[in-house]
Image (cartoon, helix red, strand yellow):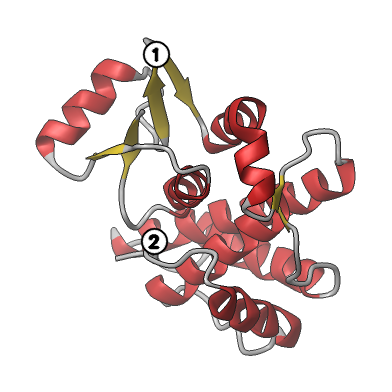
Amino acid sequence: MKLFGTPTSPYTRKIRILAAAAKLEVEMVDTRTDAGAAALSAASPLGKVPVIEVDAAVIPDSAVIIAWLWARHGEALRAAGFRLDPVDIDDRVLTAVVDGALDAAINRFYLRRDGFDDRGYVGRQGDRALAALAWLDARISFGRPITGARLAMGCALDWMVFRQVLDLTRYGNLIAFRDEWTASGVGAGTAPA
């Protein structure tokens, strides 16, 4: 399996964690390099990560890749402590909010890095991320099995701390979640770098 992504991408990280848990051999293509970006462009019209290439098929988007991994390697992932049930609507709702918060934080991070002030659209991205985190703080906790929402939350929080994008100190439950996530070793060896 070939995985197109970056070591900093929280979405790519989810796939790296699951591939390792399923004991899949993965060739990582770092799309930060010119060669990696060209390979990604040739493989997928979206030009966003992650993308996997497996058995002559190209699968874009972390949610679709996760569904594919669960369908093909569910037994190994269950044995490793994951439950990625695509019909668990409550978990999918939590995952959607986590991913929404993360997307807003990523947008704000890159726009601010490109010199845009933290107002207007950029400010609204920060507000959106903070509102979603407050909502999640009251609804998500770390535990086993690792669901899609828990996987997304752990990767999102680690990215937010790595990029220093938001003040997470006001979210006591999310801080506890991250402490337990880190102690669990679920993402060991895949931290953003």
> Residue tagged by mark 1?
55
Q: How far apart are marks 1 and 2 (CA)?
A: 25 Å
- Identify the image quadrant of residue 125: bottom right
Question: Residue 180: where, in percent of width, then height?
Answer: 64, 80
Quadrant where the N terminus sits is top left
Q: Residues within 10 Å of mark 2 (few under 14, many from 20)?
A: some
| Left or right, residue 91 beside residue 45 | right
| Left or right, residue 75 beside residue 122 | right
> Residue tagged by mark 2?
190
Badge 1 vs badge 2, beta-carbon distance below 8 Å: no
Q: How crowded is mark 1: few (under 14 residues within 10 Å), some or many (20 or more)?
A: few
- Could you tell me the amino acid type at mark 1? Asp
Please report the residue visible at 85 percent of the width from the left and 34 percent of the height from the top: 87
Question: Residue 141: where, in percent of width, then height?
Answer: 78, 72
Residue closest to the eye, 117 or 125? 125
**Residue 69 higher or lower than 28, as above or below:** above
Residue closest to the eye, 114 or 33? 33
**Residue 39 higher or lower than 91, as above or below:** above
| Left or right, residue 3 beside residue 63 | left
Please report the residue visible at 86 percent of the width from the left and 41 percent of the height from the top: 88
**Residue 83 higher or lower than 60, as above or below:** below
Q: Is mark 2 on a helix, strand or loop?
A: loop
For residue 183, which numbered disc appears in the image? none
Q: Is mark 1 on a helix, strand or loop?
A: loop
Q: Going by the picture, which residue comes out furthest to the top?
A: 56
Residue closest to the eye, 61 or 133? 61
Question: Residue 36: where, in percent of width, then height?
Answer: 18, 34
- Could you tell me the amino acid type at mark 2? Thr
Q: Which of marks 1 and 2 is nearer the N terminus?
A: 1
**Residue 153 higher or lower than 4, as above or below:** below
Question: Residue 85: where, in percent of width, then height?
Answer: 78, 39
Please report the residue visible at 62 percent of the width from the left and 44 percent of the height from the top: 77
